[in-house]
C-alpha cells in the first residue's frame, strides 16, 4: 500500500478543507494517508510521498502554522532525495504575490533534494469556488507518478 503524507499551511481554514477532502479521496482509493495541520520536520522526515496544501499569507508568505516547519527545513541538513512531492496553493489573483507560498515550498523542498513529480496547482479563490473539485482533478497528476 502506498503511503502519502499531506501537510497544510492555512490561515482561515481553506487549505485544511482541501487537504481533508484529498485525505478522504486518497483513503477511499486505498492509499495510506497521514494528515498534519501543524507539521514538524520530524513528521515529514523519511516520507516517500508528500502533498503540501497551502494558502499564501500576508505579503506572499507561508501561513503561521507551516512557517516553523520550513524554517527548520532550511536550517537542517536533511536529505529528501527519496521524497516525491506535489503542491496545491490557494490564493487571490487580486494580489501580485498570488500563490507565492507555492514557490517557497517548491524551492525549499527542492533545495533538500526532494523531487517534484508534477506541476503545482494554483487555485485562484477570486474565480474558483470549488477548491475541492480542482484539487481532486489535479490529484491523478500526482499519484500516477508515485
Image (cartoon, grey):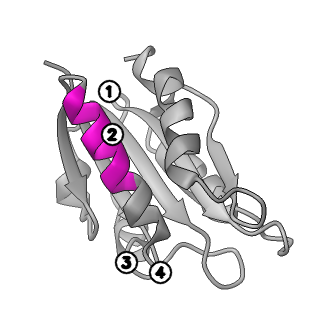
Residue on which disc 4 sits: 11
Q: Is 16 within the magenta?
A: no
Q: CA distance from mark 1 to mark 4?
A: 30 Å
Image coords of residue 17 (percent x, y):
39, 62
Estimate the spatial distance between the alpha carbons at disc 2 and disc 1, rounded to whole Å.
8 Å
Residue at mark 2 to residue at mark 3: CA–CA distance: 23 Å
Q: Which mark is residue 82?
A: 1
Do we see residue 122 in this rendering?
yes
Q: Characterize the magenta stretch by its predominant secondary structure.
A: helix
Q: Secondary structure at mark 1?
A: loop
Whichever of labels 2 and 3 marks the residue nearer the N terminus, that label is: 3
SS for dot 3 = loop
The N terminus, quarter of image: top left
Q: Residue at x 69, y 63 (%)?
A: 100
Q: Quadrant of residue 70?
A: bottom left
Residue that label 2 marks:
79
> Mark 3 sits on what residue?
65
> Marks 2 and 1: CB-CB under 8 Å?
yes
For marks 4 and 3 on the same chain, the one whose residue lies earlier in the sequence: 4
First in residue order: circle 1 vs circle 4: 4
Assign a secondary structure to mark 4: loop
- Which disc, if any, is residue 20? none
Rendering quarter of residue 47: top left
State which mark lies toward you, 1 or 3. 3
x and y percentages locating residue 7 in the rendered image = 33, 56
How many angstroms separate mark 4 from mark 3 (CA)? 8 Å
Q: Magenta span covers which residues?
A: 19-28
Relative to 59, is 77 above or below? above
Q: Residue at x 72, y 82 (%)?
A: 59
The answer to whether residue 136 is above or below residue 11 is above
Amino acid at each position: 500500500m502506498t503511503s502519502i503524507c499531506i501537510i497544510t499551511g492555512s490561515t482561515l481554514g481553506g487549505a485544511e478543507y482541501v487537504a481533508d477532502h484529498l485525505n478522504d479521496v486518497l483513503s477511499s482509493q486505498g492509499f495510506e494517508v497521514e494528515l498534519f495541520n501543524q507539521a514538524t520536520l520530524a513528521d515529514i522526515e523519511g516520507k516517500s510521498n508528500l502533498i503540501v496544501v497551502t494558502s499564501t499569507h500576508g505579503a506572499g508568505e507561508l501561513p503561521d502554522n507551516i512557517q516553523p516547519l520550513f524554517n527548520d527545513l532550511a536550517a537542517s541538513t536533511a536529505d529528501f532525495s527519496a521524497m516525491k512531492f506535489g503542491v496545491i496553493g490557494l490564493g487571490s489573483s487580486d494580489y501580485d504575490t498570488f500563490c507565492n507560498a507555492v514557490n517557497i515550498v517548491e524551492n525549499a523542498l527542492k533545495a533538500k533534494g526532494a523531487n517534484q513529480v508534477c506541476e503545482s496547482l494554483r487555485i485562484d479563490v477570486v474565480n474558483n469556488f470549488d477548491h475541492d473539485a480542482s484539487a481532486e482533478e489535479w490529484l491523478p497528476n500526482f499519484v500516477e507518478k508515485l
